[in-house]
Amino acid sequence: MLRVAGVECEAELPFSGLHQLLRPLREFTGRLEPGERDVLNRVFGEGGGTPPGRLAVSTATLALFDAAAGSRMLLLIDDVHWMDRSSAEILGFVAHRLEPGGTVILAAACTGYTCQFEQTRIPVRDLEPLDRTAAGRLLDSRHPTLAASVRRSLLEQARGNPLALRELTSSLGSRQLSGSEPLPASLPLNERFRLLYTERVLSLPTATSRTLLLAALEGSGSVGMVRAAAGDDWDAEALAAAELADLIRLEEGRITFRHPLIRSAVVQMTPLPLRRQAHHALAQCLTHDPDRRAWHLAGAAVEADETVAAALEAAAERACGRGGASTR
């Protein structure tokens, strides 16, 4: 069994993935024909001469698999969407020429990314989120003492994503996990999730990023509210670009983030001054909703402000009147 994982920082380095995959098999290169051995040596950065073509590398790779295990292997490829193009093309070529019942390739990629394997027409299975019961079991197996309110919030934020269920708690303190302190409105993302979403969010045009931030902070999903807050900067194509990037869905005038963690990523990856500007723009459009307006005024504040403090206190009193004492 061989394992390899695509690495974002090596995505432009030719054959970096293939080098990682074949390295444990170097001891078997002595069983290859001289020409095949020479090709793989050049892939490993040894020897000179003309760079080998894709067919030569593919043939040599198949020969190495056969020499190492008689064509009976399991190749596990993770994050294939970050694998360098050269390696992905070779492995796609190899996948179509494996004998039934012999070597098997199992590759995993995140949705929303362009993947070289998509062009090989190999069988694909989309993994659906865990259902509520299974998600609860996974969360409880790692954190059996979570406060009930925290557990509900994490299950809602994770939406059945196993990685989220395992990783979201790593950025929370013990008092937050016990329910003694409230959870932040946007759960902090650790490095694994930043890597997962950074590329797609940062590659968006400026207008799309600004519109997406307004949608993330607005919360209710109202296209009309986002349009009003954007003002003269409104660009109808901005939301379409975000939907094309598989970050949001647009249905009947509502904006829904494909996953709550994308919303968190958009907020956390935006510089604080821009977040304050967005909060201020939304607050100006919410004169009819004093509770939400107070929250956005607080988000826009640069320093202590008695007017904002009074608005927050009034919102808390109204929440208590409705029975929402925890809001205060």
Image (cartoon, grey):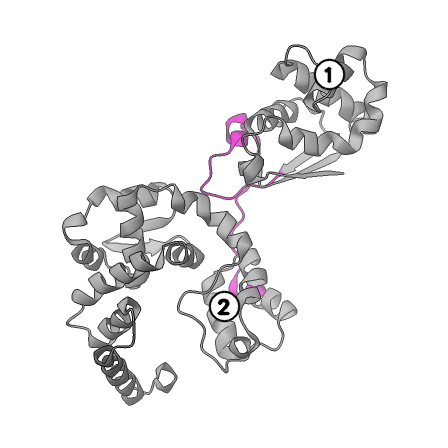
Foreground residue, 163 or 124? 163
In percent of width and height, residue 287 lies at: 15, 71
Residue under pointer 1: 47
Q: Residue at x 64, y 27 (%)?
A: 95
Q: Is residue 296 above or below residue 197?
A: below
Using the numbered discs, state the Cα–Cα distance from disc 1 to disc 2 in whole angstroms.
53 Å
In percent of width and height, residue 237 lies at: 23, 42
Task: Give residue 275's quadrant in the image.
Answer: bottom left
Q: Is residue 126 left or right of residue 306?
A: right
In percent of width and height, residue 29 lies at: 81, 22
Q: Residue at x 40, y 54 (%)?
A: 269
Magenta highlight range:
107-135
Task: Give residue 147's quadrant in the image.
Answer: bottom right
Secondary structure at numbered mark 1: loop
Residue kind at label 2, given as amino acid type:
Leu
Task: Give residue 33's quadrant in the image.
Answer: top right
Q: Residue at x 27, y 89 (%)?
A: 321
Q: Is residue 235 above or below residue 48?
A: below
Foreground residue, 9 or 200? 9
Q: Is residue 92 above or below residue 250?
A: above
Name the quarter where the C terminus is drawn. Answer: bottom left
Q: Earlier in the sequence, mark 1 or mark 2?
A: 1
Magenta-drawn stretch, dominant element (helix, strand or loop) = loop
